[in-house]
Image (cartoon, rainbow, N blue to C red):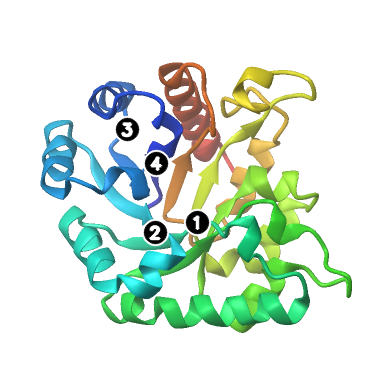
Amino acid sequence: MTEFSYQLYSSRNFPLAETFSMLAKAGYRNVEGYGGVYGDLAGLKKSLADNGLAMPTGHFGIDMLENEQERALEIAGTLGMKAIYCPYLLPDFRPTDAAGWSAFGERLRKAGEPFRKAGYIFGWHNHEFEFVPLADGSVPQQRIFDAAPDLSWEADIAWIIRGGANALEWIAAYGDRISAVHVKDIAPAGENLDEDGWADVGYGTVDWADIMKALHNTQVEYLVMEHDNPADATRFATRSLETAKRLWAAPQ
């Protein structure tokens, strides 16, 4: 059964306790964690429980995944996670050629071994840079996948589009890897500049109706609402969940 969730990074500029209360009132039952919320595990676990929320998925930086595996396992275990995703690679550390991206894919494969052995889904969460073709015409995301056959994928659809790629084609080609999806939208050109050009789901330019249809043919378990810089987190959370639930339930 596919579940709906909310990436807490969307509310990093708002009080966490208020965010949990708001999300519960909006109808959410799940949230996705990231590095900024893991400091007080006991307090976080209690706050989630007090608001009827679970955290089945979480983001963990590559440094922690490689160098602090026990801490990452402690966080995931304490919070009852089922899936762990590596979310980003800083610009200074990004490879510049095909061999480099293949090596990074192998690095992810190796980093994920202890987490897969512990029973977790382990995957990569994309941004836009993985879809910009290299000098030899290959695409970094493809190189990553080729080097890591067992790597799961949290597909961030809007970033695929911002990277100049066709999201439907990528879903068709790699849908068997998709375990989670970031559901976000892109504002029309020149709009929502105070929100970095993003929009509430269903209020932008992404064709979420067709994408939801395509995702029904994958093994996606979590549809995670995200907005990188909402001016009003309550507005974003409420309208986006309403849109996502409606489109997911539409006849296929």
- Tell me the quadrant of the picture where the C terminus can be found: top right
Circle count: 4
Residues at marks 3 and 1, CA–CA distance in whole angstroms: 22 Å
Residue 175 occupies quadrant:
bottom right
Residue 150 location in percent, x, y? 50, 79
Residue 143 occupies quadrant:
bottom right
Residue kind at label 3, given as amino acid type: Tyr
Q: Is residue 74 visible?
A: yes
Q: Which tag is nearer the camera, tag 4 or tag 2?
A: 2
Left or right of residue 41: residue 176: right
Residues at marks 4 and 3, CA–CA distance in whole angstroms: 7 Å
Label 4 sits on residue = 4
Label 3 close to label 1 by CB (< 8 Å) = no
Dot 3: what SS? loop
Dot 2: what SS? loop
Q: Is tag 3's residue or tag 2's residue first in the polypeptide sequence?
A: 3
